[in-house]
Image: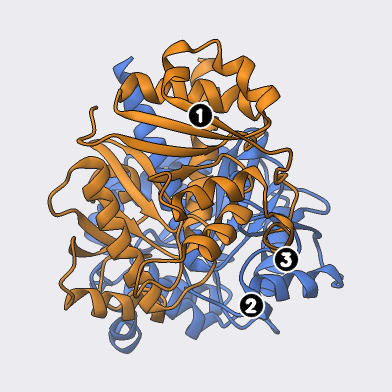
Chain colours: A orange, B blue
Amino acid sequence: MQTNKPITIALDAMGGDFGPQTVVPGAALALDEDSGLSFMFYGDEGRIKPVLEKHPALQRVSSIVHTDKYISGHDKPSSALRNGKGSSMRMAIEAVQEGKADAVVSGGNTGALMAMAMVVLRTLPGIHRPAIASVFPSLKGETVMLDLGANVLVDAETLVHFAVMGAMFAKARNGIKTPTVGLLNVGTEDTKGPDHVRAAASMLAGLKFPGKYQGFVEGTDITAGTIDVVVCDGYAGNIALKAAEGVGKMSVQFFKER
Amino acid sequence: MQTNKPITIALDAMGGDFGPQTVVPGAALALDEDSGLSFMFYGDEGRIKPVLEKHPALQRVSSIVHTDKYISGHDKPSSALRNGKGSSMRMAIEAVQEGKADAVVSGGNTGALMAMAMVVLRTLPGIHRPAIASVFPSLKGETVMLDLGANVLVDAETLVHFAVMGAMFAKARNGIKTPTVGLLNVGTEDTKGPDHVRAAASMLAGLKFPGKYQGFVEGTDITAGTIDVVVCDGYAGNIALKAAEGVGKMSVQFFKER
């Protein structure tokens, strides 16, 4: 892949279970795929530099911004917000706010990242809540799914916002001109499902937005390749994600034993 | 398996996509596993009898109750309730009410079956809503999960009822003395999840019931074998079930191609 213009990514080098040891090699892999990238590593320079020196091509397009402070996986979002100024995560987010970077990536504390990004970067105009999106493999390619747990239960309007964001994401990521969007439900008939899901369906049916609303989809559609974007609240989405993960693990185990 | 006393099962022979053609051989398989069973087939005698004659051992412990009427997969629960008197499904349910049978099984229209069973048999005292339970394979054996779609969103008290029913089911089915019960959530910390799930957790923590409440579990626990009974609302449960089914299908496809 080759992006049209150079993109700078701010990285929380201290995020995740292993910090720079995995974040730096991860950036090297990304650079292999897209030579138009450059990187800003936020975190402990003493730990980042030795790993970066093992990747000379990456080193040429990278800079390090040192800080001793970082958010741990156990910090609550509220305490990360109160006490996180000057942390690697917050500084990486601020790099986007200040226009030094185009995007920020952290493998650290999801709740803290969400809360800080929400406070520092805000949501787009008209969008009330952020969502966690991810990409599932499907029998025909990939399915974008959101929300996977940034929120639990949400109202109909928020589901509509997720549909708009999901369509934009599928467009940008997979180059799909008009992504098809489905609302996750217990059946495809109009009368099925919780009130807020049916209300969101009515709103989407009449809405002009970057995707094409296709109606309700079921859990099997996530991996069937029948739809480009699956929209749901974070409670159902997180449970579906982890149920899928569990079956994946069990399948691998099952086939190993054969 | 051998039950302690003979059990009579009322079967809706017209249920499912193929009617007697699959229901009768299904009963023969059940009899192979438990010689203490006997069966009452409700439906079109002209279609049931020829299949039953191919299974002499089954025929010896079976009777046929003829009716021309049956509920189709497309009938709405409300219309099945209004117009379903004398149908194979309704008559099979009534066999339990009248004490002629100990249990009823139908592979037909789930919504109609639920509605009719609710009206004819009622729920147990103190239980407001029925639930659909099933058994998932896990890395260590089996996990009972409910609700899988009989209801969509429910209140905290109903989740507690599901926990009680799920524990009883695991006890009866798998002979577990005190089944462990978990509430399906997006994380295991007390502060996580929707209000009604957290309220159910508080209620279960102080409740004496046939199981042992273990706290919140996540989607991965369904197949991990960490818990005997997983409790959730029908919206999340149905989505988890079908997401799991989709991943199962994709895994089989994936391993076939290797």
In the picture shown, does residue B170 fall above or below A11?
below
Residue on which disc 1 sits: A63
Camera sees residue A235: no
Residue A86 position in % (x across, y down):
67, 49
Q: Which of the 4 image quarters holds residue B246?
A: top left
Residue on which disc 3 sits: B191
N-terminal of the two: label 3 or label 2? Answer: 2
Amino acid at the residue labelled 2 = Thr
> SS class of the residue under badge 1?
strand
Residue A83 position in % (x across, y down):
74, 58
Residue on which disc 2 sits: B158
Chain hosting mark 1: A
Tag nearer the camera, 3 or 2: 3
Tell me what residue is drawn at x 16 percent, y 78 percent: A206
Residue B222 position in % (x across, y down):
60, 47
> SS class of the residue under badge 3?
loop
Name the residue furthest bottom.
B82
Tell me what residue is drawn at x 24 percent, y 69 percent: B72
Tell me what residue is drawn at x 70 percent, y 46 percent: A71
In the picture shown, does residue A59 fall above or below A188?
above
- Circles 2 and 1 on the same chain: no
Q: Is residue A147 left or right of residue A78?
A: left
Q: Is residue B58 left or right of residue A126?
A: right
Badge 1 vs badge 3, beta-carbon distance below 8 Å:
no
Q: Which of the 4 image quarters holds residue B14?
A: bottom left
